[in-house]
Image: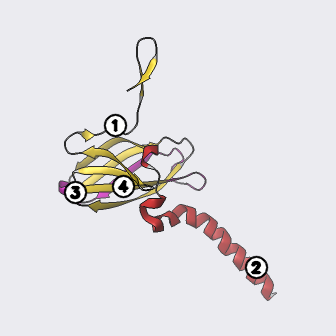
Amino acid sequence: MKKFFKTVATVFVAIVLIFVLPRYGWRIFGFSRCDFPNALYAQTVSVENGLVRIKGGTVSSASAYVGHIYSVEDSNLYVGVKHNLLLGFINRLGDFNITISVNAANIKNVYFKGGGNEKLIWNTDEGLIRAIRQATQSTGSASED
């Protein structure tokens, strides 16, 4: 009987770890486990009144947004976004709407960061920097701008 309870406890712990680690465990590793910045895009970025708001998504069609982390270094805000293919329960579309409470007066640049890479998405001089290439219609054929 003791062996049975030990087996049940082991299976229970394994099941909990299978669901909890992909959902929250990536935060332990920081930006290295966040999505690659080239897979993310920003639709809007606003930096004002002590808040930074980023609305965007991922180019992957099946991933679900599960969270974000951030850090401020010098006058740069680095945002790491995580999507999960199987265990994302919040938003199955992959869109995200992030609000970060920071001293926005000191923020000069906002970057997506993940997997050792970073991508500038906003700065004080230009505002929102288009973070994804979009196809546009030209005369006779489609081209990228």
Question: What residue is shown at x 45% (from left), y 60% (from top)?
Answer: 32
Locate residue 103 relative to residue 112 in the image: left or right. Answer: left
Residue 130 - label: 1
Which is in the foreground here, disc 2 or disc 1? 1
Tag 4 or tag 1, which sits nearer the N-term? Answer: 4
Query: Residue 95, how many percent across, how many down?
Result: 46, 45
Residue annotated with mark 4: 79
Residue annotated with mark 3: 75
Which is in the foreground here, disc 4 or disc 2? 4
Residue annotated with mark 2: 7
Residue lying at the far right in this picture: please name it: 1
Locate residue 68 relative to residue 53 in the image: left or right. Answer: right
Q: Is mark 4 on a helix, strand or loop?
A: strand
Residue lying at the far bottom in this picture: please name it: 2
Query: Residue 14, how many percent across, how many down?
Result: 67, 71
Q: How crowded is mark 3: few (under 14 residues within 10 Å), some or many (20 or more)?
A: some
Q: Distance between the residues labelled 1 and 4?
A: 16 Å
Q: Distance between the residues labelled 3 and 2?
A: 52 Å
Q: What residue type is labelled 1?
A: Arg
Q: How far apart are marks 4 and 2 (CA)?
A: 41 Å
Q: Can you say which quadrant of the picture contains the C terminus?
A: top left
Q: Can you say which quadrant of the picture contains the N terminus?
A: bottom right
Q: What residue type is labelled 2?
A: Thr
Q: How far apart are marks 3 and 1 (CA)?
A: 20 Å
Q: What element carries label 1?
A: loop
* Residue span colored magenta: 83-107
- Which of 116/35 is in front? 116
Tag 1 or tag 3, which sits nearer the N-term? Answer: 3
Q: How crowded is mark 4: few (under 14 residues within 10 Å), some or many (20 or more)?
A: many
Q: How far apart are marks 4 and 3 (CA)?
A: 13 Å
Q: What residue type is labelled 4?
A: Val
In this rendering, the answer to whether 90 lies above or below 17 is above
